[in-house]
Image: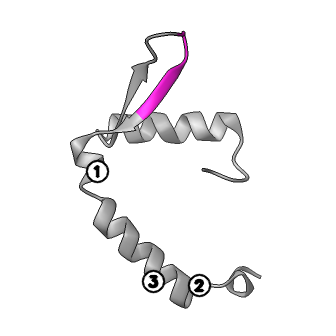
Amino acid sequence: KVEKCSDRVLVERLKELEKEGLVERVMASNSSRAVYQLTDRGAALKTIMQEIHVWSEKWYSEEDCK
């Protein structure tokens, strides 16, 4: 889930991730809608991203953004 992100920005980011080989765009079989899924390369980042999340929960607060 991505909050506070316009469709245009989301599409740009997904295209960047696709270009880097982290996600792939797949057309849903029963519609003309595209879905994105992690590639093996993207899935390999799971542990790293979890650790970044743990770090940010400990050290980051909204007060820091003000």
Vertical relation: 49 (above or below) 24: below
- State the residue position of label 1: 43
For the image, the number of numbered tags is 3
Residue 30 is tagged as none
Q: What is the CA distance from the residue labelled 2 to the residue labelled 3? A: 8 Å
Across and down, in percent, residue 1 comes to: 60, 50
- State the residue position of label 2: 60
Lower sequence index among marks 3 and 1: 1
Q: Is residue 5 left or right of residue 50?
A: right
Vertical relation: 43 (above or below) 15: below
Lower sequence index among marks 1 and 2: 1
Colouring: one colour
Residues rendered magenta in the picture: 31-36
Badge 2: few (under 14), some or many (20 or more) residues near its Cα, within 10 Å? few
| Of 43 and 59, the residue lying toward us | 43
- Callout 3 amino acid: Trp
- Callout 2 amino acid: Tyr
Q: What is the CA distance from the residue labelled 1 to the residue labelled 2? A: 25 Å
Assign a secondary structure to mark 2: loop
Badge 3: few (under 14), some or many (20 or more) residues near its Cα, within 10 Å? few
Badge 1: few (under 14), some or many (20 or more) residues near its Cα, within 10 Å? few
Vertical relation: 8 (above or below) 40: above
Q: Is residue 29 left or right of residue 63?
A: left
